[in-house]
């Protein structure tokens, strides 16, 4: 049942030009950044060769590329998740799901999986760029895997937040703006007090970016993974509650 | 119980904040019945239907569908319900077939039965010609039919239709009414409307809801009884005076009307025959004699516009 809903969600996404446009634009921008990174690496290469234990291709090209990808996804996730529930609410199509023998959890998980499938496709396309380097050089595949896992976790958390925001409103644009606001806030939250003598541990922990950075370095800490899982569970749980509340009060 | 009760609503109450939309409504629906739900705008028709279909949680009360409690086992109960809300819940980006396929899967129709279920729904709702077209490009009438197709796709025990004929042209309305009657043979149907003749044309049971309360509940036959009132309208070219008319056996009162006719009230026996005999014998030159009937409109207005619904509330119990 979850997969039925997820399948429809993915299908509707690709029936609108939005998904295609997002894929194309992201691919174009990332390709440009990728080329810029390669260019930079080629300029540095003679000097790097002289240094003992110098950082390799994975550190100089792949890690910054994935870091940029995180930022780009921060910008486009709200566009993809905004219509998940708000549009159904606006068109009054939610009653189709409510009167079918489907639980609220199934509805939310279905929608979530549908949008994750889209991001899966997006990340797979992005992963092709660093992987293309294999044609000419050796890559630290462990580091690449950690980085891609980080990106996947990051985007899964983004999507959960977007889904929740979409469940709050009837207006897709409002959902997009509030998703973007919350994501950006969580992205930069550790900037608060950054120039003070000591940064707040709580704010640093809350930052989406901090946990991603460790993964990009190739450090697979369970605490980072747990952080993302907590965010996902929290916002999925809130979305289910929110949708359930639709039946209770108006 | 010899008749199969498909839906049972007991003491249903629903508040929106402080406003009471539905207050202590109870009724039941048995197989083969078409229940017409009448009421003014905002009377609580849609709220009641939303509760029955699980789109809205009741503040108090119980709904059982085919013996399954809607709140305890929502999934099993919802399997027995097909619902067409006021605005059909259609996805404009999908074709009719894609949409119905999705609905079939949502309603857990077995994979090998889906194609047949869709074909049946097409046939019943006359969608054969548009099955590959985008729903968004269809006319309102066809969209409405797609909504109905979606509601009957999984052959539910109860089909709930919220104002199914709104916005349709007269031909389409006739077709939809015929479809509803046909469906009524196998399913229990609850239908809300504020078009009164529609109820007389399609339903077997009538309920009138006003300000959240059920003020009238009876079968169409019972309603017909109510529509007959004990009076006749008679026109004479040589009008006898009221006193003479009162002498006719059975007539209790004669009330001259403005247009030269007279209204004759009677108690138990219809005085028509006696009156005609008398008219011929006395040369009153009777040219018109008609039993007076109240229209459903009159009953409806009586029930919904008076502050006190009066004796009709007792009929509900």
Image (tube, coloured by chain):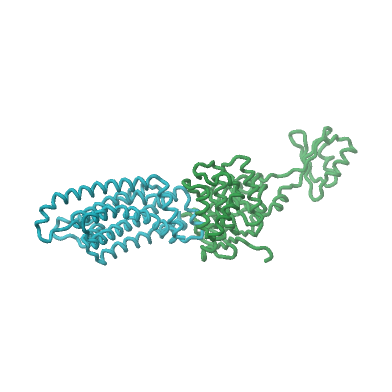
Residue A191: give x, y in percent of width and height.
20, 55
B244 in relation to A248, above or below? above
Using the image as rendered, state which of residue B304 and residue B266 is in the foreground.
B304
A80 in relation to A206, above or below? above
Residue A219: give x, y in percent of width and height.
22, 64
- In this view, the residue farthest toward the left is A50
Q: In which quarter of the image is residue A60?
A: bottom left
Image hue for chain B: green
Residue A122: give x, y in percent of width and height.
33, 52
Using the image as rendered, state which of residue B131 and residue A42 is in the foreground.
A42
State the residue at coordinates (30%, 59%): A153
State the residue at coordinates (9%, 56%): A50
- Chain letter, cyan in picture: A
Q: Is residue A66 visible?
A: no
Using the image as rendered, state which of residue B214 and residue A61 is in the foreground.
A61
State the residue at coordinates (37%, 46%): A18
Q: Can residue B128 be seen in this view?
A: yes
- In this view, the residue farthest toward the right is B281
- In this view, the residue farthest toward the front is A135
């Amino acid at each position: 049942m979850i997969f039925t809903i997820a399948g429809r969600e993915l299908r509707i996404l690709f029936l609108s030009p939005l998904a295609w446009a997002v894929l194309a634009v992201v691919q174009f921008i990332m390709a440009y950044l990728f080329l810029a990174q390669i260019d930079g690496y080629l300029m540095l290469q003679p000097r790097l060769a002289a240094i003992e234990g110098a950082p390799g291709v994975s550190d100089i090209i792949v890690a910054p590329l994935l870091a940029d990808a995180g930022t780009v996804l921060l910008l486009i996730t709200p566009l993809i998740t905004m219509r998940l529930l708000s549009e159904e609410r606006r068109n009054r199509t939610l009653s189709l799901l409510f009167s079918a023998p489907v639980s609220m959890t199934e509805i939310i998980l279905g929608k979530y999986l549908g949008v994750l499938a889209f991001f899966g496709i997006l990340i797979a396309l992005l992963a092709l760029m660093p992987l293309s380097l294999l044609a000419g050089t050796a890559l630290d595949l462990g580091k690449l895997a950690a980085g891609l896992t980080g990106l996947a976790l990051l985007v899964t958390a983004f999507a959960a937040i977007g889904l929740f925001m979409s469940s709050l409103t009837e207006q897709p644009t409002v959902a997009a703006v509030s998703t973007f606001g919350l994501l950006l806030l969580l992205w930069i939250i550790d900037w608060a007090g950054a120039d003070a003598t000591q940064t707040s541990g709580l704010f640093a922990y809350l930052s989406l970016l901090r946990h991603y950075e460790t993964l990009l370095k190739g450090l697979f800490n369970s605490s980072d993974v747990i952080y993302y899982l907590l965010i996902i569970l929290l916002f999925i749980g809130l979305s289910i509650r929110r949708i359930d509340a639709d039946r209770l009060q108006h | 119980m010899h008749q199969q009760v498909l839906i049972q609503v007991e003491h249903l109450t629903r508040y929106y904040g402080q406003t009471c939309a539905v207050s202590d409504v109870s009724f039941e629906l048995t197989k083969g019945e078409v229940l017409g739900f009448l009421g003014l705008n905002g009377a609580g028709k849609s709220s009641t239907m939303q509760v029955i279909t699980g789109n809205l949680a009741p503040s108090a009360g119980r709904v059982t569908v085919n013996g399954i409690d809607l709140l305890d086992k929502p999934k099993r109960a919802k399997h027995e319900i097909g619902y067409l809300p006021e605005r059909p819940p259609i996805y404009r980006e999908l074709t009719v077939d894609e949409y119905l396929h999705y609905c079939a899967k949502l309603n857990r129709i077995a994979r090998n039965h889906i194609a047949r279920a869709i074909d049946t729904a097409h046939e019943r709702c006359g969608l054969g010609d548009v099955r590959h077209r985008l729903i968004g490009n269809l006319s309102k009438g066809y969209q409405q039919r797609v909504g109905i197709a979606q509601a009957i796709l999984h052959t539910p025990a109860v089909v709930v239709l919220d104002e199914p004929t709104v916005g349709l042209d007269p031909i389409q309305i006739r077709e939809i009414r015929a479809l509803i009657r046909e469906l009524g043979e196998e399913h229990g149907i609850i239908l809300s409307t504020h078009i009164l003749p529609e109820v007389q044309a399609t339903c077997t049971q009538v309920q009138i809801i006003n300000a959240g309360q059920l003020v009238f509940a009876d079968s169409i036959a019972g309603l017909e009884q109510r529509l007959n009132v004990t009076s006749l309208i008679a026109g004479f070219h040589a009008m006898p005076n009221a006193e003479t008319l009162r002498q006719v056996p059975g007539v209790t009162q004669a009330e001259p009307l403005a247009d030269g006719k007279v209204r004759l009230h009677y108690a138990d026996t219809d005085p028509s025959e006696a009156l005609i005999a008398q008219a011929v014998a006395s040369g009153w030159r009777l040219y018109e004699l008609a039993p007076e009937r109240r229209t459903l409109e009159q009953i409806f207005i009586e029930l919904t516009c008076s502050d006190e619904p009066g004796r009709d509330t007792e009929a509900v119990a």
